[in-house]
Amino acid sequence: FHNVTPARLLYRWNPLVAARAALAAAQLRALPKGLRWIAVSPFNRQVLYDYGFRQVDLVPLVIEPAPGDEKSETPLLLFVGRITPSKNVAELLRGHEQVCARSRRRPRLVIVGARKPRCRYGDWFERCLERSRWRHLVTWEQHSLAYRRLLELHARAWLYVSLSLHEGFGVPVCQSVAAGTPALYLPCGGTESVLNGVGCVRRGQAE
């Protein structure tokens, strides 16, 4: 069980997808409570407990250590994830703009993640990127990268930054940590349960 994105995070942008998420939650409530489950994080296990299931085994995902590449010469921020409302990537662009406006050494932001066609949130993200004063410092990798290339990015980044609002586990954050790159992220459920809250920035602290 890798969790279901809450419908409330999707409704504004895609009511149909939000309805599907709500139906998935309804299915979980209706399923026989004697079913056995495997959860990939303590957060997911607790979600299943809250639905009334009691036979839940915890089997965390395995994170492969990245190669020990040197850090990039210029400050590099990294985010890996789909361009969806729950990932909050448009807000990440705004945060990058604020950092660039206040810093003498302006960091480059690399976003690795695809968007779906006819996705309103994807359209909004692209408009935000086009309007950004610092868009020349943003690299958006829309297509899949070779796995080794992705691990190299995790190792070369100075900081991994995520403003995701919901994660069942948070693999990219853990990949950066395994590569020796510090990570900051908002409370999102799964990631802080896996990392015991290390690197989790509460909203008041993030302002």
Image (spheres, rainbow, N blue to C red):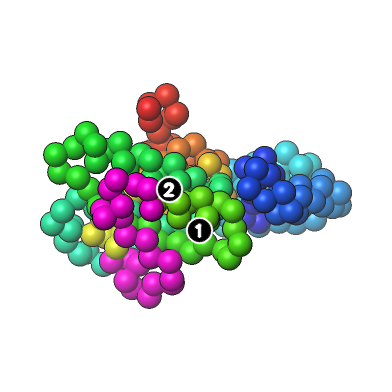
Q: Residue at x 19, y 37 (%)?
A: 103
Query: How far from the left and from the top, in percent, is residue 40?
Result: 58, 54
Where 152 falls versus 157 (above or below)?
Answer: below
Residue 36 in sight: yes
- Give residue 119's position: percent from left, percent from top: 59, 58
Q: Is residue 55 visible?
A: no
Which mark, by number, is residue 128? 2
**Residue occupying image coordinates x 29% and y 45%:** 133
**Quarter of the N terminus within the rendering:** bottom right
Residue 82's label in the rendered image is 1
Which label number is shown at residue 133?
Answer: none
- Whether residue 201 is situated above or below residue 43 in the rendered picture: above
Q: Which residue, as the protein is rendered here, is positioned at the far bottom?
A: 146
Observer-side mark, 1 or 2, equals: 2
Q: Amino acid at mark 1?
A: Arg
Percent of width and height locating residue 135: 31, 52
Expressed as whole percent of the image width and height from the top left, the position of residue 31 reads 84, 52
* Mark 1 residue element: loop
For this rendering, which residue is in front, 167 or 49?
A: 167
Which region shows up in magenta?
130-152
